[in-house]
């Protein structure tokens, strides 16, 4: 058969719909039978830059020997052809022993019977895909037309490998995109965090054909019952390995496999089917994602794909994951705040109502005192008979009853007993700021918060202290006439050897007139048209009841700062206990 | 014997009237003022043994008036007399000598006056 006919057959096979291995093996068989060669073998260049002996003619005797070792680029004849991308031909007289590679000891005594060898690169203009090796025991050497023919065949096989690689990479890309899009859907869903994380584990397992995927969060973001979310089972087979890998990927901040942990020299012998990648967002370590296969599937392609896939996925889900968790947290916080706002509104209404009631009670008290007082006087002056005296007694008894009721109303602060709790002051400041900023009257007020995070929790009656802060904030608002800046700071201070938490509220409202500053804590002192003059008086009382005090730093024409000091160790409670 | 002289300061006319009647009956000489400034004016021009002071008054309130009185004469005893019981335990911090919750029953007021002035 002439070379043109052979090439025609090769072209037909090359362009057929057969699967890649069938096509290349068929072409190699044609070369072996029709040329004839004893050996027709194709090495492929894998992603780890090593050459794998992958396809052969049916009768190949060398394949299983050459397959024992995967040459690096530049190593042996195969490696050097790959490196130089130039074909090389030898006869048994000039061929280097073991085809130039020390790692083929089993070739000794085998290649002596071959007379001619030829190695051809499988490449196009930019990429090398592998090497074609042919060996003949019949031919003394290859003639020029045979060499040209082989280079044409090599180009054809190179083409098959290239289109295959394109198909694989686009398939990979498509499945990656599909996976990422599924992950995206999950991450943006409204599901609860636990379901989101379990679903992510499932999707990754499906995409990577892994037998298990486990996500471990570094710390409890939310009130999650667990920090690990797993698809499949790993604990029974590789529990310890997984935990070791997770620790290592956290430490190194990159994807690791058992091979990365193996001692030098053993690295190539460790078979990897386990990867752990860190999840980080904005430099913050969120946790790890680990995939693994229970059955050891060896081979470099599988390995590299595993690493690549998990890295892509880890990158993709890291920020999404944080956002999702934060969003969920935000939802919780918002609903909590909404509740808090409702409670505060009730409280505020109650406070106003309380003050108003106190005011009304006060207005009633005076006339009542007058009625009762003069009734008494009248009874004393006028001579009354038994019945008339009884009437007077009834009036006086009822007056006394009303007085008692009014006294109760007028003492409304004192009447509510303090309920001490350990409170984080920044929490109720946040609550109040949220409450106020949602109010239209506060639109033009800029509220800045500066918290000292070292302030420990303070023992106090949170409802009462909130009332104090509401009073001070309302005054700050009024002082600024609705436009300005209010700064709230928390801090700590030692006063007379005792530790205090401080909450300072500054406004830009022009300060307090020095002429009245001494009076502002006095009851019924007010500069407001509709004020009761009770707000700061009661606030001061509450703080004093807590063993604290309120300090005012006033800068005329600039603004006022109210600092509420609350003792960190509550002496009042202690005294009561003793 | 010279009568003990009291000054009643209250913005409510009938309270002034009631207390005046009740206290005069006890043998005191009683003058009245309807607000803080009026009271200070009277204290400047006459000698009083004791002042009974309402807290909630328009203009200058009781606590302010109290401070002014004590500035003028720190030895002049002052009883705060308010419808509010809320601030009863604070009176000494305001340098007042007593605190009485207003009531139709003037027993407490009378007793407090006696206690402060040391009258049997």
Image (spheres, helix red, strand yellow):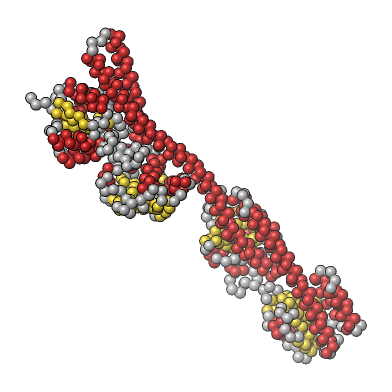
Q: Residue at x 68, y 62 (%)?
A: A177
Give residue B103's quadrant in the image. top left
Where residue A543 sits: x, y (%)?
A: 33, 42
Where residue A243 sits: x, y (%)?
A: 58, 59
Taking B110 as reference, is A39 left or right? Answer: right
Residue at the farthest left position? B1
Taking A174 as reference, is B81 left or right? Answer: left
Residue closer to the observer: A435 or A557: A557
Q: Residue at x 23, y 10 (%)?
A: A383
Where residue B70 sits: x, y (%)?
A: 18, 39
Residue at the farthest bottom position? A93
Q: In the figure, A322 relative to A365: above or below?
A: below
Q: Residue at x 16, y 40 (%)?
A: B72
Q: What count of labels does the image hold?
A: 0
> What quarter of the picture does the C terminus of chain A occupy?
top left
Taking A375 as reference, is A82 left or right? Answer: right
Residue at the farthest right position? A1
Give residue B82's quadrant in the image. top left
Q: Residue at x 79, y 74 (%)?
A: A160
Where residue A376 sits: x, y (%)?
A: 26, 18
Residue closer to the observer: A114 or A456: A456
Residue A211 visible at all: no
> What quarter of the picture does the N terminus of chain A occupy?
bottom right
Residue A82 visible at all: yes
Residue closer to the observer: A217 or A193: A193
């Amino acid at each position: 058969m002439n070379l043109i006919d052979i090439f025609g057959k090769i072209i037909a096979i090359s362009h057929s719909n057969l699967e890649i291995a069938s096509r290349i093996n068929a072409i190699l068989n044609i070369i072996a039978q029709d040329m004839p060669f004893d050996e027709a073998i194709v090495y492929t260049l894998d992603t780890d830059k090593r050459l794998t002996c992958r396809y052969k003619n049916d009768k190949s005797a060398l394949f299983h020997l050459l397959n024992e070792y995967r040459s690096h680029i530049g190593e042996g004849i195969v490696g050097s052809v790959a490196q130089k991308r130039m074909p090389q031909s030898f006869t048994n007289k000039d061929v280097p022993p073991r085809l130039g590679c020390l790692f083929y000891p089993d070739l000794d005594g085998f290649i002596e019977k071959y007379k001619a060898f030829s190695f051809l690169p499988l490449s196009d203009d930019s990429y090398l895909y592998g090497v074609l090796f042919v060996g003949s025991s019949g031919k003394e050497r290859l003639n020029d037309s045979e060499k040209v023919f082989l280079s044409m065949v090599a180009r054809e096989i190179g083409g098959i490998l290239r289109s295959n690689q394109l198909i694989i990479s686009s398939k990979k890309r498509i499945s990656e995109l599909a996976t990422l899009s599924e992950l995206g859907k999950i991450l943006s869903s409204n599901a609860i965090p636990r379901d989101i994380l379990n679903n992510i584990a499932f999707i990754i397992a499906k995409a990577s054909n892994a037998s298990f995927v486990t996500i471990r969060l570094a710390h409890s973001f939310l009130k999650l019952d667990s920090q690990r979310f797993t698809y499949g089972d790993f604990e029974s087979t590789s529990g310890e390995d997984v935990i070791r890998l997770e620790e290592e990927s956290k430490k190194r901040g990159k994807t690791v496999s058992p091979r990365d942990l193996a001692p030098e020299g053993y690295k190539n012998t460790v078979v990897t089917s386990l990867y752990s990648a860190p999840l980080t967002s904005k430099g913050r370590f969120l946790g790890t994602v680990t995939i693994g296969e229970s059955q050891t599937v060896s081979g470099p392609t599988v390995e590299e794909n595993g690493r690549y896939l998990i890295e892509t996925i880890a990158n993709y889900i890291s920020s999404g994951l944080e956002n999702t968790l934060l969003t969920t947290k935000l939802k919780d916080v918002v609903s909590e705040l909404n509740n808090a706002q409702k409670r505060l509104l009730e409280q505020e209404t109650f406070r106003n109502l309380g003050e108003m009631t106190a005011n009304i009670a006060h207005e009633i008290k005076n006339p009542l005192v007058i009625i009762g007082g003069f009734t008494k006087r009248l009874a004393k002056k006028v001579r009354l008979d038994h019945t008339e005296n009884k009437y007077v007694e009834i009036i006086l008894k009822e007056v006394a009853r009303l007085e008692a009721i009014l006294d109760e109303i007028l003492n409304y602060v004192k009447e509510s007993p303090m309920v001490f709790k350990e409170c984080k002051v920044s929490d109720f400041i946040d609550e109040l700021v949220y409450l106020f900023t949602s109010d239209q009257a506060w639109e033009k007020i800029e509220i800045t918060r500066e918290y000292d995070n070292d302030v420990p929790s303070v023992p106090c009656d949170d409802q009462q202290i909130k009332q104090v802060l509401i009073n001070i904030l309302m005054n700050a608002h009024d002082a600024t006439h609705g436009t300005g800046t209010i700064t709230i700071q928390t801090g700590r201070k030692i006063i007379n050897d005792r530790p205090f938490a401080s909450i300072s509220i500054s406004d830009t409202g022009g300060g307090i007139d020095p002429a009245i500053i001494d009076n502002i804590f006095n009851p019924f002192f007010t500069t407001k048209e509709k004020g009761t003059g009770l707000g700061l008086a009661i606030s001061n009382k509450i703080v004093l009841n807590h063993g604290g005090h309120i300090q005012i730093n006033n800068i005329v024409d600039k603004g006022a700062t109210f600092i509420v000091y609350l003792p960190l160790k509550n002496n009042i409670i202690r005294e009561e206990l003793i | 014997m010279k009568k003990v002289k009291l000054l009643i300061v209250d913005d409510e006319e009938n309270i002034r009237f009631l207390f005046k009647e009740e206290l005069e009956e006890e043998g005191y000489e009683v003058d009245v003022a309807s607000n803080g400034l009026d009271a200070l004016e009277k204290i400047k021009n006459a000698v009083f043994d004791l002042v009974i002071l309402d807290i909630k008054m328009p203009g200058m309130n009781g606590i302010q008036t109290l401070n002014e009185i004590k500035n003028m004469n720190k030895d002049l005893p002052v009883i705060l007399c308010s419808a509010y019981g809320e601030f009863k335990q604070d009176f000494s911090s305001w340098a007042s000598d007593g605190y009485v919750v207003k009531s139709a029953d003037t027993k407490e007021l009378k007793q407090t006056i006696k206690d402060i002035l040391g009258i049997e």
